[in-house]
Image: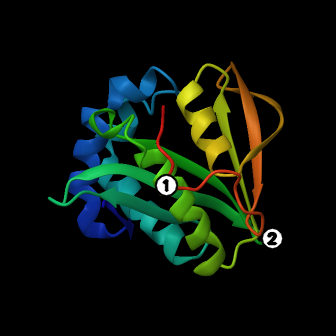
Amino acid sequence: MPEIQRLRLDHGPALLAFEEENRAFFAASIPDRGNAYFARFDARHAALLAEQAAGSHHFHVVVGDGGEVLGRVNLFDVAADSAELGYRIAEKAGRRGLATNVVGRICVMAADEYGLTALRAATTVDNAGSRAVLARTGFRPVGEILLSGRPGIRYLRHLNDAPDVPAGGAER
């Protein structure tokens, strides 16, 4: 079972490799990070760790048995006992239930370890996989938005509410 680890400095090289290997795959469904992200990765990684240390964000990597980064799952903009959820899973690790499992587990961590009571999320309308993961893990649509000019849906999950389907459910 892949492990969710809090982001650390030593994750940098594997995280950069993950982002580079999956860049085109991610860009098909979410806005691309742009060349500057990759050119200044080390500085950005250090800045994220500083923000995490200040308590405004909780960043995580999903690490496989061999130490390879298979995904990210982040809780950012922490305020008033809630946060925004963001996640991405490597193309080669997709469609096997990993995203559903990881999002379900981070919901538990958000409540138990970080004391959060609600999570927000958003995805584009055309990202059926992400919409399914959010639905399976107890998130409910609460409105329409634009994400980098693309139609999207905003979701909310109250962490004291149990999801309708177990977090370990398989993705389709």
> Is tag 2's residue or tag 1's residue first in the polypeptide sequence?
2
**Residue wearing tag 2:** 80
Tell whether 77 sits left or right of 10.
right
Amino acid bearing label 1: Gly
The secondary element bearing badge 1 is classed as loop
Of residues 98 and 58, the one nearer the viewer is: 98
Q: Local crowd at mark 2 within 10 Å, few (<14), some, or many (≥20)?
A: few
Tell whether 147 sits left or right of 13.
right
**Residue wearing tag 1:** 168
Amino acid bearing label 2: Ala
Q: Nearer the viewer, mark 2 or mark 1?
A: 1
The secondary element bearing badge 2 is classed as loop
- What residue do we see at 57% from left, 25% from top? 127
Question: Of the numbered discs in the image, which one, if any, rests on residue 43?
Answer: none
Q: Quadrant of residue 149?
A: top right
| Residue 133 x %, y % | 57, 41
Tell whether 166 sits left or right of 138.
left
| Residue 41 x %, y % | 32, 48
Q: Quadrant of the N terminus?
A: bottom left
Q: How is the image coloured?
A: rainbow
- What residue do we see at 77% from left, 50% from top? 156
| Residue 28 x %, y % | 45, 20
Tell me if label 2 and label 1 are in contact, CB under 8 Å: no
Q: Residue furthest left?
A: 66
- What residue do we see at 19% from left, 61% from top? 65
| Residue 110 x %, y % | 61, 70
Of residues 143 and 48, the one nearer the viewer is: 143
- Measured in 3D between alpha carbons, the distance from the residue under mark 2 to the one under mark 1, in whole angstroms, is 28 Å
**Is the residue 53 above or below the residue 36 in the image?**
below
- What residue do we see at 20% from left, 54% from top? 68
